[in-house]
Image (cartoon, helix red, strand yellow):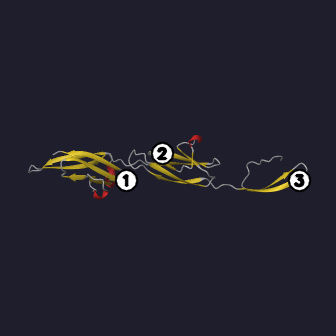
Amino acid sequence: PISNVFDDLEPGTYQVIAQDALGCFEVLEITLTEPTVLEFSSVITDEICLGSSDGTISLTISGGTAPYTTSLNSNQDSDFTANLTMYNDLPSGTHVVFVRDANGCEVFEVFEVEAGVNLSGEVGLVYECDPFGITTNYVEVVFEDPGVAANVLYGLDTTDPNLMQLEPIFNDLTSGPHTITVLHSNGCTNSFDFEVES
């Protein structure tokens, strides 16, 4: 053909002959290579506390043709950002991340950020009078989600994990303001302020 463009060629080695009107020619050997498959791996971290929107996804991209661009929850051209491989502050729920290479090849992954633990609840303060007329008290933390209790430490007027206990009940508190801080094994914390009457 009288053309200098050859489309849709498979990877391999080709000989191209260029010839002028007088019959002079030159043989060119051209090797076309194919990039490796564009792919990526991801590491996802879930929310720490319920509603904290602190999930993340970290991407490791390989193959294809660099540079790479990525987008979260959209594959519109305007939403892609070059060399962005870490997304932070993700709420719980389903997300999708898209990766494109310099040739426009695109791959994606749908992933889930799990909801954090729910440490909401309340402090129950109970006053009791023994048979001798002596008033005692105790306080207990009751969670909205009782299932979290097995993985929580409880601290009365402390945030130091070394001074916390495994049980949610504190007995015979002095009068005045107090705070119970709860610490989940995943790092989520919450505090409950209350006051013991004299």
Q: Amino acid at mark 3?
A: Cys
Whole-percent x and y of residue 66? 62, 52
Q: Mark 1 Cα within 10 Å, few/some/many (few <14, many 20+)? A: few
44 versus 74 height, above or below = below
Residue highlighted by disc 1: 187
- The part of the image, by quadrant, that contains residue 63 is bottom right
Q: Amino acid at mark 2?
A: Thr
Q: CA gap, disc 1 to disc 2?
A: 23 Å
Sequence-wise, which precedes: disc 2 or disc 3?
A: 3
Q: Residues within 10 Å of mark 3 (few under 14, many from 20)?
A: few
Question: Percent position (x, y) of residue 43?
Answer: 49, 54
The percent coordinates of residue 142 (x first, y second) are: 28, 47
Closer to the observer: label 3 or label 1? 3
Q: Residue at x 31, y 49 (%)?
A: 146
- Gap between marks 3 and 1 measured at Cα: 77 Å
What residue would you read off at disc 3? 24
Q: Residue at x 22, y 52 (%)?
A: 170
Which element is circle 3 on?
A: loop
First reached walking from the N terminus: tag 3 or tag 1: 3
Horizontal side of residue 137 vs 85, given as left or right: left
User: Considering the numbered disc 2 on the image, is that residue within a helix, a strand or a loop?
Assistant: strand
Q: Which residue is mark 2?
A: 94
What secondary structure is found at the residue carrying circle 1? loop
Task: Give the alpha-carbon distance from disc 2 to disc 3, as whole Å.
Answer: 64 Å
Task: Using the image as rendered, state which of residue 87 and residue 15 is in the foreground.
Answer: 87
Q: Amino acid at mark 1?
A: Gly
Q: Decide if residue 87 is on the left or right side of residue 2.
A: left
